[in-house]
Image (cartoon, rainbow, N blue to C red):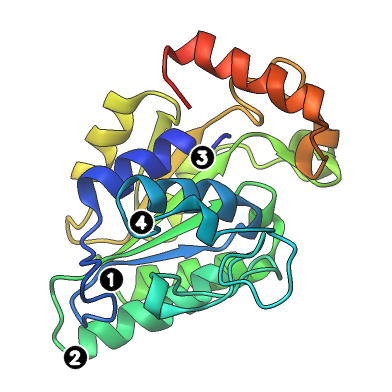
Amino acid sequence: MSLVELLAVLYSEYLSFDINDPKSEFRDRVIMSKGQGSIAMYAAMHRVGIIKDLSEIGDLLGDGNIYYKQTTRNTDYGIEFSSGSLGQGLAYAVGVAWALKKKNNRASKVYVFLGDGECDEGSVWEAASLAGHLQLDNIVVIIDRNNLQIDGFTYDINRMDMMEERWSAFGFDAVTIDGHKIIEIDRALSFAGAGKPYAIVANTVKGKGISFAENEPEWHQNVLTDDLYNRAILEIRGNNNVAL
């Protein structure tokens, strides 16, 4: 839920992706490094027609599914990266972005979603250092800073203060926004590609819009009962005045 608005704006307004030519060399790439965000990504993909019918998704734990609870690479469906092991997505993105530069592809961007807890991993900062060194202005890193990870609150586990300044120190243009405000997301994404790699630190709320899940560590990977699902739907409809 912390990623919903970020993905909605990206997919509906900025992502260059032709559903009739999903393997086009000039497509934008989305890498969901924080793999648990894939379910929100599938919803955004459905809204723009990449996933034509939600019945395609099926059981997110089912064997052989195209759409799994952690993304499994399948470029026929616009899924660029298999996730699961955190801290790997940015390094992969650096390789993709550098290859695009080598191919003289100046059109495509590589969007990478990281969790703030994931940023504990040294591999993230090694990749960030290389992206800054190579001046990969075709990379946009979006950090879902919801202050929670599987083990609990990030400030209890490994404080990541001055997140914007950290990315700037590695050679990125960086900005901090409210990750639930459409106007701020739109403004931030419109700035991408100004000569440096770009990092958007999005302050968000885990479980946003659902009272019993907001800022609750156990909802990192909890399971909805039918009663809780119905309650969540009613709360989301009431908060956003939308039909689901």
Circle 1 crowding by C-alpha within 10 Å: few under 14, some 14–19, many from 20? some
Disc tally is 4
How far separated are the C-alphas under marks 2 and 4?
23 Å
The amino acid sitting under disc 4 is Phe
Mark 2 element type: loop
Q: Nearer the viewer, mark 1 or mark 3?
A: 3
How far separated are the C-alphas under marks 4 and 3?
22 Å
Given contact means CB atoms under 8 Å apart, are the residues at marks 2 and 4 in contact?
no
The image's mark for residue 135 is 1
Between disc 1 and disc 3, whose residue precedes? Answer: 3
Q: Is 195 left or right of 37, judged from the image as shown?
A: left
The amino acid sitting under disc 1 is Gln
Q: Nearer the viewer, mark 2 or mark 4?
A: 2
Between disc 2 and disc 3, whose residue precedes? Answer: 3
Mark 3 element type: loop
How far separated are the C-alphas under marks 4 and 1?
8 Å
Q: Residue at x 77, y 45 (%)?
A: 158
The amino acid sitting under disc 3 is Leu
The image's mark for residue 3 is 3
How far separated are the C-alphas under marks 2 and 3?
32 Å
Given contact means CB atoms under 8 Å apart, are the residues at marks 4 and 3 in contact?
no
Q: Is 231 left or right of 23, judged from the image as shown?
A: right
How far separated are the C-alphas under marks 1 and 3?
27 Å
Q: Is 208 left or right of 181, judged from the image as shown?
A: right
Q: Which residue is mark 4?
A: 172
Asked where in the image residue 20 lies, by quadrant, the reply is: bottom left
The amino acid sitting under disc 2 is Lys
Q: Which residue is mark 2?
A: 103
